[in-house]
Amino acid sequence: MADDDLPRLLRDLGATAVATLLAQHVDDGRGYCRACSLPQAGPSRWPCTLRAAALAARDLARRAR
């Protein structure tokens, strides 16, 4: 998968999917992603990959208008 494939996929899923990811993948106040912190994997640094991809998808959609 190329670096820009995930943002394009998310953009194609629609604004609701992107907004949901942005709402869920937030800083927990300690510099980690609230949604990506799983017991078996440990915490992910914020901003996580999914948040960055959702922001890129939102930007792609805005430029396409």
Image (cartoon, helix red, strand yellow):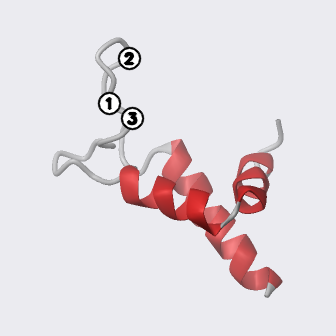
Is the residue under label 3 in contact with that under label 2 (CB below 8 Å)? Answer: yes
- Work out which quarter of the rendered image holds the C terminus and state it: bottom right
Residue beneath label 1, please? 37
Q: Specify the quadrant of the image occupied by residue 35.
A: top left
Is the residue under label 3 in contact with that under label 1 (CB below 8 Å)? Answer: yes
Q: Camera-side residue: 11 or 5?
A: 11
Q: Secondary structure at mark 1?
A: loop
The picture places residue 27, in percent across and down from the top left corner, at 28, 52
Q: Earlier in the sequence, mark 2 or mark 3?
A: 3
Q: Kindly report the distance in space between the C-alpha atoms of the residues bearing marks 1 and 3.
A: 4 Å
Residue beneath label 3, please? 36
The picture places residue 8, in percent across and down from the top left corner, at 78, 57
| Mark 2 Cα-neighbour bin, 10 Å: few <14, some 14–19, many ≥20 | few
Q: Camera-side residue: 4 or 54?
A: 54
Tell me the kind of residue under disc 3.
Cys
- Work out which quarter of the rendered image holds the N terminus and state it: top right
Asked if 49 appears above or below 15 in the picture, the reply is above
Residue beneath label 2, please? 41
Q: Secondary structure at mark 3?
A: loop
Rendered residue at 49%/53% (across/down)? 21
Asked if 36 appears above or below 40 in the picture, the reply is below
The picture places residue 64, in percent across and down from the top left corner, at 81, 81
The picture places residue 40, in percent across and down from the top left corner, at 35, 11
Asked if 60 appears above or below 18 in the picture, the reply is below
Q: Is residue 63 left or right of residue 55?
A: right
Asked if 56 appears above or below 1 in the picture, the reply is below
Rendered residue at 31%/29% (across/down)? 43
Which residue is outermost to the front? Answer: 16
Which residue is outermost to the bottom? Answer: 65
Tell me the kind of residue under disc 1.
Ser
Q: Secondary structure at mark 2?
A: loop
